[in-house]
Image (tube, grey):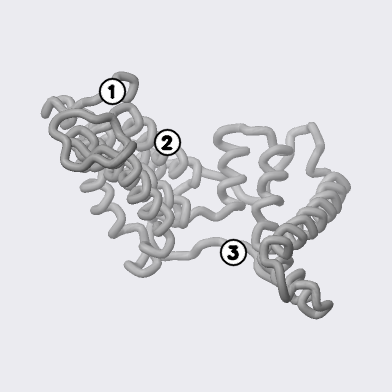
Amino acid sequence: MTILTPPAGRQAIYRINPVAKLGAAAILSVALVLSIDWVSASVALAFEGVFFLFAGLGPRRFFLRTSPVWLAAVLGAMTVLLYGRASGESHFHFLLMNVTDGSIELAIATLLRVLAIGLPAVVLFVTVDPTALADGLAQVIRLPSRFVLGALGGMRLVGLFLDDWKSLELARRARGVADRGRIRRFAGQAFALLVLSIRRGSKLATAMEARGFGASNQRSWARESRFGWHEILLILIALVVAGTALATSMATGQWNFVGAT
């Protein structure tokens, strides 16, 4: 049975409250979304690259975990390059595709911005324990415990989907109904997994209600979620990186507010 296991590591990032990681990622995302320019994204990436060295991820694990971000950044940049707003000299034109000076600059800015937003978010959340995140959301942010614990229960069962999918595939092969028609097989297997997930979710909800997880009174927590100076330092670092990136962009005249594009 595959279950999500808490991440482990000796680096300090593993001991920081997940709420602070969530806040730091949000600060960087909001700051970089405000402007589409290559300067702010480059400055942010330069700072983030230094802090990635202390994240406790080796090169192989780093690129494996962040591979969807790299792929999304390249695809997004290619789309903007070919179909972005045309301005300046045209270098290539075919049907709807038009590569110009403006689209090249916008594609570079898009590539860097996706990386600057996505990479730190992935790196920060790789080190997050779902139970610690739930403790932080309920104790620090004061979200409703019923919602938090329900979400935690769902996250803990995500790993079971892979086992269920493999079991369904083996069972259908044993019955001789999975040898042909990949699309039809996928649709039928996905529906079977949906039914199985609904049944398991209903049982889990009943069990949690029976154990008092849905009570409206003030509940106790097995682990105290602390928000100390380590968490404040991470938030301050995110503010400094975001502020430096925006200030550099404005100082160099590259600030390009997203509403003006």
Going by the picture, which residue comes out furthest to the bottom? Answer: 174
Q: Which residue sits at x=39%, y=39%?
A: 24
Kindly report the distance in space between the C-alpha atoms of the residues bearing marks 1 and 2.
18 Å
Q: Which residue sits at x=39%, y=46%?
A: 118
Camera sees residue 109: no
Q: Residues within 10 Å of mark 2 (few under 14, many from 20)?
A: some
Q: Which residue sits at x=32%, y=39%?
A: 95
Which residue carries the number 1 mark?
Answer: 257
Q: Residue 114 or 18: which is nearer the viewer?
A: 114
Helix, strand or loop at label 2? It is helix
- The residue type indicated by label 1 comes to Phe
Mark identifier at residue 26: 2
Which residue carries the number 3 mark?
Answer: 5
Kindly report the distance in space between the C-alpha atoms of the residues bearing marks 3 and 1.
41 Å
Q: Say which label, 3 or 2, has the lower sequence index.
A: 3
- The residue type indicated by label 3 comes to Thr
Going by the image, does 69 lie left or right of 179? left
